[in-house]
Amino acid sequence: MPWLIVLASASLSLSTCSPSVDSEQLRLCRQVILALNADGAVIREIRYGPASLGREGVRIDYAVRAPGEAERVRRLDCGFAGRTFSGERLDLIAVETESGALGDAQLYYLKRFWLDSPESASVSEARGPSVPPLPFPLAYVIQQVINATALSAVYALLATAYSLIYGITGRINLAFGEIAMLGAYGAIGAIAIVVALGLDNPLAGVAVALAVAAVFSGLWSAVIGAIVIAPLHARHRLGQPILVATTGLAVALQEFLHVTQGARERWVPPLFQLPIALARAGTFVVTVTPLQVALVILTLAAALGMLWLFTRTRFGLSWRAYADDPLTAALVGVDGGKLLSTTFVLAGASTGLAGAVVGVYYGNVGLAMGTLLGVKALIAALVGGIGSITGAFLGGLAVGLIETAWSAYFDITLRDAVIYSVLIALFLLRPGGLFGFANPEPPRMGRAGA
């Protein structure tokens, strides 16, 4: 998993067209441009980037053509009191143009009567670079597919975790949603530590958050597997004890988070969410953010990594042999206990990454999110075929796309009902899921430590 963290961090750097800039700071700086130019002026943004003004600054180079005048190139530097993770990150403390810096009185009136006014938020921002035109239906579909990336990545990673455990034990761990929330809280805690240490670099913060979430959830999953699931798996032929135990664990973990973190949601500032225009259909612009690009790369890397691990390594061979017949695998030297422990760590790390994606992408984490995520990811695993790692991953992507498509074109209040209806219809037609067995049978069980 560490190489996935490095890959995700590198993709954030490569997917950004200019040096890292806080998207909210850039938005405020663009609003300042509108205040400094005459009404009716045509503004065309040329480039943006960091500036050495304040603790963190944003520079925008733009061209403006006022009514009856020729176009001219101007610049604007905005200085802020804090960086990305600081509470003062949106406190504008300095503004400088090619003509010089604004005085204290000018800056006060700019903030008081323009940036803080409702009219400022409703005015269109400076126009960005030209992008290829597309028909509106095509542009809208492309935008919805882009919007589905984060949700699909979360479902895919969680569905993979379900299949990892089910494939080797034949049982479902219903506590994975809460383990994902543990990873999300761990990621936010890691960002808080990064800020406390004064290392408030956004890229470093995301990398540390992903790593901590994977390790934290991996350890929790290993402990739960060793103390609860493995003993029950070894002693009971039926799966009900594990279902009941993991349901109780889910409630216990939720209460643990409630006691330690409180009922209020935890928030982080938007990271790498600056939209990059890809195409246009009239006033509708198709955009993508560096974080969405990074999530696509991370998800594909996870899929390829899992495929390589389970098809090209000794661990994958042992896992597949034990999943097929535990007793025979033990006879040829497969250590079932060690294999089960490693699988729980791997599933927990995948779950933790999913939780970190939720926290970083959506910017907040709440106690109720774990249950909903767990149920949706379980549906994704069942749709794809819970006994198949690849099938569960593809099932996660499919459920994310279906949810986004329904929300985009139909009544969003019926979205969950549609997802559950699709699951029921699928089970009637193909009980093993899209990529599982057409007529699945309970796996032959052996002792976990055999």
Image: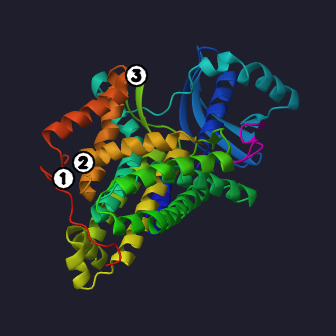
Q: Amino acid at mark 2?
A: Gly
Residue topped by disc 1:
436
Asked whether the residues under the numbered discs 1 and 2 touch, taking CB atoms below 8 Å apart as contact, a structural biologist would say yes
Q: Is residue 371 magenta?
A: no
Closer-to-camera residue (431/244):
244
Closer-to-camera residue (9/125):
9
The residue at 42%/59% (across/down) is: 350
Label 3 crowd bin: few (<14), some (14–19), many (20+), radius 10 Å:
few
Mark identifier at residue 384: 2
User: Is residue 187 something one can see in this rendering?
Assistant: yes
User: Is residue 15 something one can see in this rendering?
Assistant: no
Which badge, 1 or 2, is on the more N-terminal residue? Answer: 2
The residue at 35%/50% (across/down) is: 156
The residue at 65%/27% (across/down) is: 31
Asked whether the residues under the numbered discs 3 and 2 touch, taking CB atoms below 8 Å apart as contact, a structural biologist would say no
Q: Amino acid at mark 1?
A: Gly
Q: Is residue 83 magenta?
A: yes
Against 253, is 89 above or below? Answer: above
Percent across and percent down for residue 11 are 45, 56
Q: Which quadrant of the rendered structure holds the N terminus?
A: bottom left
Label 1 crowd bin: few (<14), some (14–19), many (20+), radius 10 Å:
many
Magenta span: helix, strand or loop, mainly? Answer: loop
Mark identifier at residue 93: none
Question: What's drawn in magenta, residue-wise?
Answer: 80-93
